[in-house]
Amino acid sequence: MPLMKGYLYLEQFMRSLAIVKKNIRIYYSKGPVVIFGLLVPFFLFLSFFIGRNITVEALLPGLLGMTAFFTATSVGPAIVPWEARARTLERLISSPISIWTIFLGDVLSSFLFGAVVSVFPVAVGLFIGVEIANLLILGVGIILATFCFASFSILLSAYPPTDTPASVMMLSSMIKLPLVFISGIFIPIEEMPAWGKPVSSISPLTYFTDLARHSIQGNGYYPIELDLTVLAAFSIIFFVTAIKIHERTMQKRL
Amino acid sequence: MNSENTVEVSNLTKSFGNLVAVDHISFQLKGGELFGFLGPNAAGKTTTIRMLTGVIKPDEGTASIMGYDILTEGLKTKQNIGIVPEMANAYVDLSAWNNIMLIGELYGVPKKQRQKRATKLLKEFVLYERRNHLVKGFSRGMKQKLLLCMALINEPQILFLDEPTSGLDVESQRLIKDMIREFNKSGTTVFLTTHNMEEANQLCDRIAIINHGKIAAIDSPERLRMRSSGLQSVEVSFDKKISVDELSKIHHVREAKKIGDKMRLYVDEPSLVLDGVVDFARSKKLRIVSLNTLAPTLEDVFLKLVKES
C-alpha cells in the first residue's frame, strides 16, 4: 500500500514537470514577467548603486537578494489569471492531476527562473574578482530562497481570484516593493533603527540577504542555521497556504 | 454495445445563487453508447458535463464513471475520460504538437506512445502539416480538431464532447461527426451535448432532452418521435383554395395549418383522417393534388417537450 501511494506521488510529480515545461515555453517570455522580473529590479538596483561609494562585496548580497526575489516571484502570479483568461485552466482542472500537482509545477517553473537568473550576479561577481567566503552556503541559500519566493509568488495570485494578469502583477508589486525596503538590502539589519529590526524579521527576503552577507562578506546578523530554517519554514507555510486558498477560490475562476 | 453502465448519474444538482442550473437529473450510459444531451441554450448541458468531468462540484447527488465516484475518486475518473470542453482552449502560444504532448504527459501516456498516437491523430484530422505551427494562427475549425486530438491522446474509454461542432463550417462539421462515429464504432462511449437536433438525430443511439436543468425525456431518436402523440400530421393540397377553418372541421383533425400551398392537418392517428379528407374533397368537388402522411421531426418533439417542461 505505501509503495502504491509512493508510485502515485511520483506519477503526479512527473505530471507537474509537464506543467513546468509548458510554463517555461509560454510564460518566461511574457511581457509582465520580463518587466517585473528583470527590468524593475535592474533599474531599482541602478538607482541605488549609481553615485554611491560602496564596495562590490557590500553591493553583491543586496543585488543577489533583489534578483532572486524579483525573478522567482515574477512567473508565479501571472500563470493562474492568465490561464483563467485564456480558458486553458479548465483543461488543466479536467486532467487527471491534483491542484497540488498544478501548483507544484507553477512553483518549480518560478523557482527555475529565479535560480538560473540569480546565478548571473554571482558569476559576474566571481569574474570581477569578488571572493566568496562560502560558495556552498550561498548555493544552498539561493536554492532555498528561490523556492521560498516561488511559493510566495503563487500565494500572491491566490486572492482575489481574478482573470486579469496585470491586476495581479500590480497588486504583487505593492506587496513586493515594501518587502524589499525592509529586508536589509539597502540598509543592513544591524544599521536599522530599533523598530526596523522586528519589522524586517517578517520578510523572507531578510534571511536570504543575511545569508548572502554571511557567504560573501563572511558576516551576517542572524546565525546561518536560523536563516536556513526560517527560509524553509516560510517555503512550507507559503506553499500550503497558497494551495489551500487556491482550492477554495478555483471554482470562481472557472 | 456493452450492457454495463459506464456512466451512472443520480440526482445530480447544481445551483449558481438562486438559479438551479441542473435539477436532480439521473441517467445511465451503457458501454459503447453514443449518448446525446440535447437542449436549448442555458438548459444545463455544459454544467452537467463540467460536473461529470470534475471541473465543478455538484451541490447534491452522485455520479460514477467506469465505477469510480466523481467526487471521491476524481483522478481515477479523469484518467479514463477524454474531454472537448465548450469553454476551454488549447494553448495558443504552443504548437499543435506541444499541446498534444502536454496533455499526453498529464495523462501519463509514455513518450513513444504519445508521439505515435499524436502523429496518427494529426493525420486523421488533417492537421499534421501544421503540427509545428503555433495554435494562435489556427482557425476555429482547426482549433476544434486539435482539441479532439488532445482529448483522444489517452485513448479514453469515454469521450465527453461539449458542442463539438458549434460554429464550424460544414466541412469541419462533417469531418468531426465522421470521426465521432469512427471512435464510437471502435468501442468508445461518447457523451455529446448539442443544441442541434439534426446532429443528435444523425449521431446518437439515445438522446436526453434537458430544459431548465431538468430532463424532459430520454429515449432513442426514433422512439422519441413515435411516442409524441399529436405531432403526426397529414399534408394535403387541392386544386382550389380552401380555408383552414373548413378543414379543421374534419373528424379527428386537431388543428389545421396552411404551409405554403399545402394544408397540414395535425392528428393523433393519420389513417383515421384519410377517409374524412377524401369525403371532404368529394363534397366540395375538389381534386386532391397530393396527400402525404408525415411523422414528426425530432425538432417537433424537442419543441413540444421543451414547451411542456
Image (tube, grey):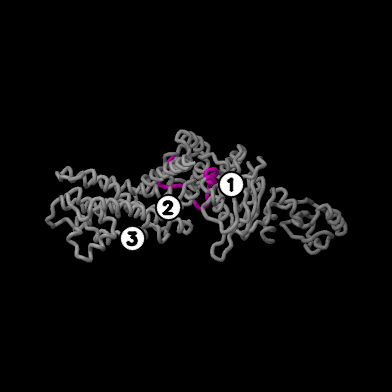
Where are the magenta residues, as a range?
B76-100
Distance of label 3 from label 2 (alpha carbons): 18 Å
Residue A206 figure quarter: bottom left
Foreground: B26 or B182?
B26
Residue A232 rendering spot, x and y as whole percentages: 32, 51
Q: Residue at x 62, y 38 (%)?
A: B185
Q: Is residue B80 magenta?
A: yes
Distance of label 1 from label 2 (alpha carbons): 27 Å
Residue B189 rendering spot, x and y as whole percentages: 61, 43
Amino acid at pointer 3: Met
Q: Which residue is mark 3?
A: A170
Q: Residue at x 27, y 45 (%)?
A: A140
Q: Which residue is mark 1?
A: B65
Q: Which residue is mark 2?
A: A83
Amino acid at pointer 2: Glu
- Give the foreground label among 1 and 3: 1
Q: Is residue B88 magenta?
A: yes
Q: Which mark is residue A181?
A: none
Q: Is residue A33 visible?
A: no
Distance of label 1 from label 3 (alpha carbons): 43 Å
Q: Which numbered disc, 3 or 2, marks the residue that appears first in the sequence?
A: 2
Foreground: A254 or A245?
A245
Q: Is residue A24 visible?
A: yes
